[in-house]
Image (cartoon, rainbow, N blue to C red):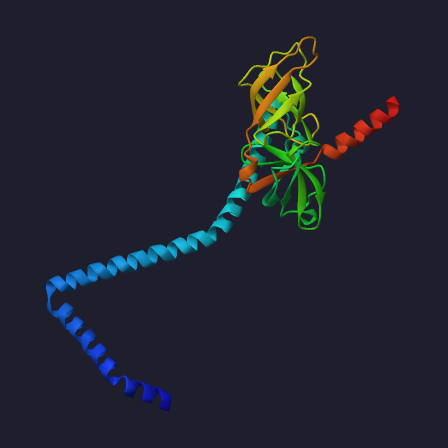
């Protein structure tokens, strides 16, 4: 306390000057209409700027929550859309078939695009019902399949992986083949095993076929950009521009197929009988 008193006493001239300055400013503003108006206009501008800055900071830190909420809503919308598609295309009332796909939103924690074998890490795992083999999609199309899982994380094998294959279909003609990346450009992939009697053209849309019960039918993969048929070749060489920009992945959705295990078991038994 003594130090504070000594400090004030030592700088008493400065504090007296400061007090008188503030008093004069108050008297000027209080007794002059013009200065009063200018003061309040200036203070309002400063207050507005401070409030705007404060609001911007709050909005920035709330973006994560907003994005997660939007991802969950998007998963719910996809679920409803898939149910409607099955009802319309298959004309079924079987609730098991209508509800065969479920969607879980996840945040991308790590993502490579520059390697021959690229992988994606997401923040959902066994605790969320994920297991290897599940399909993963982004906001614009197919992304890959779950490769391995821990309790809270999963690693996804990307479509930008030379070892990954997805059953794809030319939407216009219904011819199906295998989508497989050639390891050259992250913007493009290839569609293989389309027979020579098919008629693919530039601009054709390529979607998932739904034959392997991993991806629902009709998930966007990309657009045909190049077609080439070599002499006597049994299949077309087809290049696709991917609809999903893998360099900007932030959130994805993992697809749970409730009928996949049943389908796989039946095919395994049938294959065993043929042998």
Asked if residue 203 lies left or right of residue 20, the reply is right
Residue 101 percent coordinates (x, y): 64, 35
Quadrant of the image for the N terminus?
A: bottom left
Horizontal and vertical percent position of residue 239: 60, 22
225 or 84, which lies in front?
Answer: 225
Seen in the picture, residue 97 relative to 191 is either above or below; the reply is below
Q: Is residue 146 left or right of residue 16?
A: right
Q: What is the quadrant of residue 273 in the picture?
A: top right
Q: Please give the name of the residue rendered at 67% of the width and 45% of the height, measured from the top-left corner.
A: 154
| Position in image of residue 224 (x %, y %) | 57, 20
Q: Give the answer, above or below, for where 176 lies relative to 136.
A: above
Q: Is residue 145 visible?
A: yes
Please identify the quarter of the rendering in which residue 142 is found: top right
Which of the 4 image quadrants contains residue 133?
Answer: top right
Identify the residue at image location x=19%, y=63%: 39
* 140 vs 275: above or below: below
In which quadrant will I find the C terminus?
top right
Residue at screen point 75% across, 34% down: 261
User: Can the viewer see residue 91?
Assistant: no
Residue, far bottom = 2
Q: Horizontally, is 250 left or right of 265 in the view?
A: left
- At 58% from the left and 40% from the top, the residue drawn is 252
How many numbered marks have been drawn onto this rendered protein structure?
A: 0
- Foreground residue, 105 or 95? 105
């Amino acid at each position: 306390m003594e130090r504070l008193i000594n400090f004030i006493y030592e700088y008493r001239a400065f504090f007296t000057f400061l007090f008188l300055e503030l008093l004069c400013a108050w008297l000027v503003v209080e007794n002059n209409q013009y200065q009063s108006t200018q003061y309040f206009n200036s203070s309002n501008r400063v207050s507005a700027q401070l409030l705007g800055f404060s609001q911007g900071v709050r909005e920035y830190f709330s973006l994560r929550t907003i994005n997660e909420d939007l991802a969950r809503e998007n998963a719910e919308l996809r679920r409803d859309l898939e149910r409607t598609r099955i009802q319309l295309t298959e004309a079924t009332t079987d609730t098991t078939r209508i509800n065969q796909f479920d969607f879980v939103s996840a945040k991308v924690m790590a993502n490579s695009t520059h390697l021959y074998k690229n992988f994606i890490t997401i923040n959902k795992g066994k605790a969320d019902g994920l297991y290897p083999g599940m399909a993963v999609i982004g906001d614009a199309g197919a992304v890959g399949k779950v490769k391995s899982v821990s309790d809270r994380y999963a690693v996804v094998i990307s479509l930008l992986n030379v070892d990954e294959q997805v059953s794809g279909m030319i939407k216009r003609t219904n011819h199906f083949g295998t989508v497989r990346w050639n390891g050259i450009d992250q913007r493009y992939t290839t569609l293989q095993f389309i027979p020579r009697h098919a008629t693919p053209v530039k601009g054709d849309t390529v979607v998932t076929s739904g034959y392997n019960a991993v991806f629902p039918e009709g998930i966007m993969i990309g657009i045909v950009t190049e077609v080439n048929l070599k002499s006597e070749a049994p299949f077309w060489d087809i290049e696709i521009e991917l609809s999903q920009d893998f360099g900007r992945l932030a959130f994805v959705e993992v697809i749970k197929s409730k009928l996949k295990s049943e389908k796989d078991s039946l095919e395994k038994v049938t294959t065993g009988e043929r042998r």
